[in-house]
């Protein structure tokens, strides 16, 4: 019960009891009076009724005044003192008590504030120590998270119930983004997110089969990885590899899914297979014709001339067919000549410039390089190509005794030609033959790398000759395939380590209990929440429209800032001027935005299976309810309201606005009156309210909802 | 005096028809089955044109071409590469080393005869 009401109930009951006692004493006194004394007393009272009534009234008024003073000076300040001390001790150690009340209460508050100062200083010191101790391990985890983000394979880590507890950017792209990079609006497909079920994106049967296989493999200790093929939203074929995660007791606690898009690879393989197949068939048919005809000619030398001519025509025809077939196959197969070496696109000029700088140090050669007018683009494995270049220069220096060489670059649409020139005799053929096969370096696997191999991997050729076009200068020419105009390709984003770990990096959920269908009895700390807020054209749900929805998820008591929902909505009507001043959203910003029906479908997917949280949720829920029919979405999720939860934990405070609660709990609001900004602030408040509710014995969703219903704010209807 | 042609190829099935074809067209023909033999025949036979395969044993066709081009006495000898190596980079290399033409296997008889004529005509 509200402390205000409780006090007045107490005062009223005390007053009634006091009155009854007075009445009893008066009655005893009346019984002892003689009849003439009674008459005299009545006549005195009647004569002085005004004075008697005034005296009683004044006594009553004084009593009420004194009681009210006690209430406001002692009782309410004491209650606030208790509440605010709880805040200091639990969620906001920087909070200080500023209350009005009696001198004793104020001195008590000062004493508590002083204690809080000392506690805070101590805590800050401890925090600094902990922070310092954590920094190193945090750095390593950040590197791991950043590396995961840049992996070309999609990674999903799930607990044993199939809940996603970690994912990387690539996994999200594979399952969610379309070719235009925008999220798909199809409600049938699940989303990738912390706490979401992996069965929403990968068929359950496939995963169950893979996990069964892993379980069987673990028992026999021979195989512990299972692979399967699945299909992504865009009908891309994904090869998934499931790897189990075991705890120290070798018990299965979850699994890692490594996903690779093999669509293109399979297409290439299948193209090559069909090419090979048709080539084999074609060759067999032609050879059969040639062989049969030639054998007849050999076995029957007396064949008639017409028949002989016919057989030779067949042989001729089939040989032409064979030749054409080889040409065609060679042309189609040429794409597979591309080496498996990772080749990087760069301009030949840059390559030569790098070589020029390095060559000055070792082998101590000066290159006079003439820069071409156009950038000539080539694809090279820079390390091996530069090594080959330097090797050639060193050998040239040894063979010719020269230390200065010329270099020029020419290019056409097929080749980039790099000439290393010098005056004097060209390299002897035998010398270049030896040089072509000389070991440049030994690779890790112990395999020797020679110039010929490097050139082969680049589809290139290097050879020595005399350039008659360049005043008979001796020359070593490098012929590299030209790769056309544009420069950049496959440039990755720079990996910048975040100050704190990306929020989707959280291993604690491995210890989550199993998925319990009954949400009501689950602790508040274990539930998944979607905290949302709406901006509207006004405050009347019957007439006004939603123009913006922001939402954010809370999983494992953490606000997942990366998993948010921020969408403007075209309300299909003009915005009232007053509302523009309030939320800053202008008409032109909404023109190309989706309708509320489209947006609610996406929000429905986003919030599926979670508890909805909002500040003054009744209003937002009513706004959503108004669109139930047109959007065909019914938000049946359980709902919690931070306004009501605040009223539960701080009943003595009259103000439960977002700003007031934020100030009390030490949350700074950024982007107030933007849907996402308010949703984030609400989420932060909610996370801080959970431990305060626990102190009051409210642990589960049901307990929180029941307590909310009892607050006076719960009676607000929209 | 008919022009002299040296056919340098290790595949007999190529050499025999080419020999026959060139003789039919009135050329004087000689064959070599590896790079070393080709150089010897160039010295002894002094051909006007060489039909030169690339993948020759002992000394490959590119090297034979380089040797011919590096010897001033042989500067007038024409070279046509006749090879199964059909990559553009091989053709570019062959021509850069001083060959006059490049024909990929398989070829039509008419095509090779035409090429031989064209190349020999440029000399006259």
Image (cartoon, grey):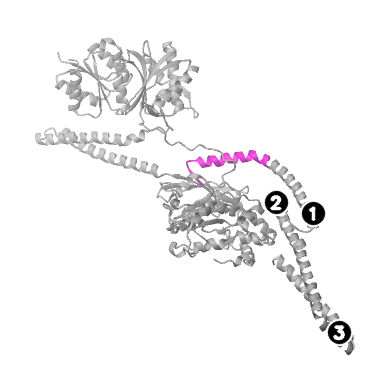
Q: Nearer the viewer, residue A3 or A708?
A: A3
Q: A69 left or right of A596?
A: right
Magenta region's main secondary structure?
helix
Q: Is residue B10 magenta?
A: no
Q: In what quadrant of the picture does the C terminus of chain B appear?
A: top left
Is residue B95 visible to the viewer in this orientation of the structure? Answer: yes
Residue at coordinates 53% horizontally, 39% vertically from top-left? Answer: A147
Q: Nearer the viewer, residue A45 or A299?
A: A45
User: Residue placed farthest to the front in the image?
Assistant: A47
Horizontal and vertical percent for residue A133? Answer: 68, 40
Q: Is residue A154 magenta?
A: yes
**Circle 1 residue:** A107
Mark 1 vs mark 3, foreground winner is: 3
Instruction: Answer with the quarter of the image where residue A353 lies.
Output: top left
Horizontal and vertical percent for residue A85? Answer: 73, 55
First-in-chain label (2 vs 3): 3
Please, what secondary structure does the residue beneath circle 1 have?
helix
Q: Nearer the viewer, residue A375 or A555?
A: A375
The magenta stretch is A131-155
**Circle 3 residue:** A41
**Circle 2 residue:** A95
């Amino acid at each position: 019960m509200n402390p205000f009401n409780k006090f007045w109930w107490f005062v009223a009951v005390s007053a009634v009891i006091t009155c009854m006692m007075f009445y009893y004493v008066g009655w005893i006194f009346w019984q002892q009076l003689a009849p003439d004394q009674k008459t005299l007393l009545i006549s005195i009272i009647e004569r002085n009724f005004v004075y008697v009534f005034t005296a009683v009234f004044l006594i009553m008024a004084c009593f009420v005044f004194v009681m009210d003073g006690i209430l406001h000076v002692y009782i309410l300040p004491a209650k606030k003192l208790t509440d605010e001390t709880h805040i200091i001790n639990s969620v906001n150690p920087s909070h200080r008590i500023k209350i009005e009340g009696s001198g004793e209460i104020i001195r008590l508050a000062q004493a508590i504030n002083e204690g809080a100062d000392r506690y805070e200083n101590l805590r800050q010191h401890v925090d600094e120590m902990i922070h310092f101790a954590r920094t190193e391990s945090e750095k390593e985890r950040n590197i791991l998270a950043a590396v995961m983000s840049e992996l070309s394979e999609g990674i999903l880590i799930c607990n044993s119930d199939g809940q996603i507890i970690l994912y990387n950017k690539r996994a999200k792209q594979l399952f969610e983004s379309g070719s235009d990079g925008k999220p798909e609006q199809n409600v049938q497909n699940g989303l990738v997110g912390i706490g979401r079920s992996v069965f929403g994106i990968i068929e359950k049967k496939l995963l169950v089969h893979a996990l069964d296989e892993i379980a069987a493999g673990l028992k026999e200790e021979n195989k512990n990885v299972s692979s399967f093929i699945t299909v992504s939203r865009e009908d891309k074929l994904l090869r998934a590899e499931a790897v189990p995660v075991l705890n120290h007791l070798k018990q299965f606690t979850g699994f890692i899914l490594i996903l690779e898009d093999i669509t293109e690879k399979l297409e290439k393989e299948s193209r090559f297979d069909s090419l090979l197949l048709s080539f084999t068939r074609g060759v067999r048919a032609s050879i059969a014709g040639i062989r049969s005809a030639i054998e007849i000619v050999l076995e029957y030398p007396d064949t008639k001339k017409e028949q002989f001519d016919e057989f030779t025509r067949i042989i001729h025809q089939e040989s032409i067919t064979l030749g054409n077939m080889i040409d065609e196959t060679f042309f189609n197969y040429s794409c597979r000549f591309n080496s498996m070496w990772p080749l990087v696109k760069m301009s030949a000029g840059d390559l030569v410039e790098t070589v020029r700088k390095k060559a000055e140090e070792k082998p101590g050669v000066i290159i006079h390089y003439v820069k071409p007018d156009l950038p000539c683009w080539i694809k090279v494995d820079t390390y091996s190509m530069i090594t080959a270049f330097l090797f050639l220069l060193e050998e040239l220096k040894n063979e010719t005794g020269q230390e200065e060489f010329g270099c020029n670059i020419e290019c056409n649409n097929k080749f980039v030609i790099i000439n290393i020139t010098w005056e004097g005799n060209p390299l002897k053929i035998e010398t270049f033959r030896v040089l072509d096969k000389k070991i440049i370096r030994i690779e890790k696997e112990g395999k020797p790398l020679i110039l010929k191999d490097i050139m082969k991997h680049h589809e290139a050729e290097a050879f020595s000759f005399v350039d008659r076009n360049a005043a008979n200068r001796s020359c070593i020419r490098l012929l590299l395939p030209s790769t056309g105009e544009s420069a950049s390709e496959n440039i990755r984003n720079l990996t910048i380590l975040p100050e704190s770990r990306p929020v989707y990096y959280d291993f604690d959920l491995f210890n989550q209990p199993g998925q319990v269908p009954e949400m009501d009895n689950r602790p508040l700390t274990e539930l998944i929440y979607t905290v949302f807020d709406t901006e509207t054209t006004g405050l009347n749900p019957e007439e006004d429209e939603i123009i913006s929805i922001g939402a954010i998820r809370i999983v494992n008591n953490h606000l997942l800032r990366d998993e948010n929902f921020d969408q403007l909505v075209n309300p299909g009507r003009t915005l009232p001027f007053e509302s523009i001043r309030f939320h800053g959203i202008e008409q032109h910003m909404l023109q190309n935005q989706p309708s509320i029906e489209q947006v609610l479908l996406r929000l429905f997917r986003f919030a599926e299976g979670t508890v909805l949280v909002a500040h003054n949720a009744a209003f937002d829920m009513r706004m959503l309810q108004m669109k139930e029919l047109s959007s065909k979405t019914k938000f049946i999720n359980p709902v919690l309201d931070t306004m009501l939860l605040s009223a539960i934990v701080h009943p003595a405070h009259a103000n439960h606005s977002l700003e007031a609660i934020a100030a009390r709990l030490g949350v700074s609001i950024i982007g107030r009156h933007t849907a996402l900004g308010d949703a984030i602030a609400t989420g932060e408040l909610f996370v801080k309210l959970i431990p305060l509710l626990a102190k009051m014995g409210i642990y589960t969703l049901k307990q929180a909802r029941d307590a909310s219903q009892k607050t006076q704010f719960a009676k607000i209807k929209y | 005096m008919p022009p002299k042609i040296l056919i340098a190829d290790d595949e007999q099935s190529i050499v025999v028809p080419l020999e026959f074809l060139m003789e039919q067209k009135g050329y004087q023909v000689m064959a070599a089955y590896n790079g070393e033999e080709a150089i010897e025949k160039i010295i002894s036979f002094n051909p006007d044109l060489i039909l030169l395969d690339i993948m020759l044993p002992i000394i490959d066709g590119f090297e034979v071409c380089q040797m011919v081009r590096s010897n001033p006495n042989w500067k007038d000898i024409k070279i046509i590469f006749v090879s199964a190596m059909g990559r553009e980079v091989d053709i570019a290399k062959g021509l850069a080393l001083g060959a006059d033409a490049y024909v990929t296997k398989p070829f039509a008889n008419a095509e090779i005869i035409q090429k031989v004529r064209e190349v020999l005509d440029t000399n006259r």
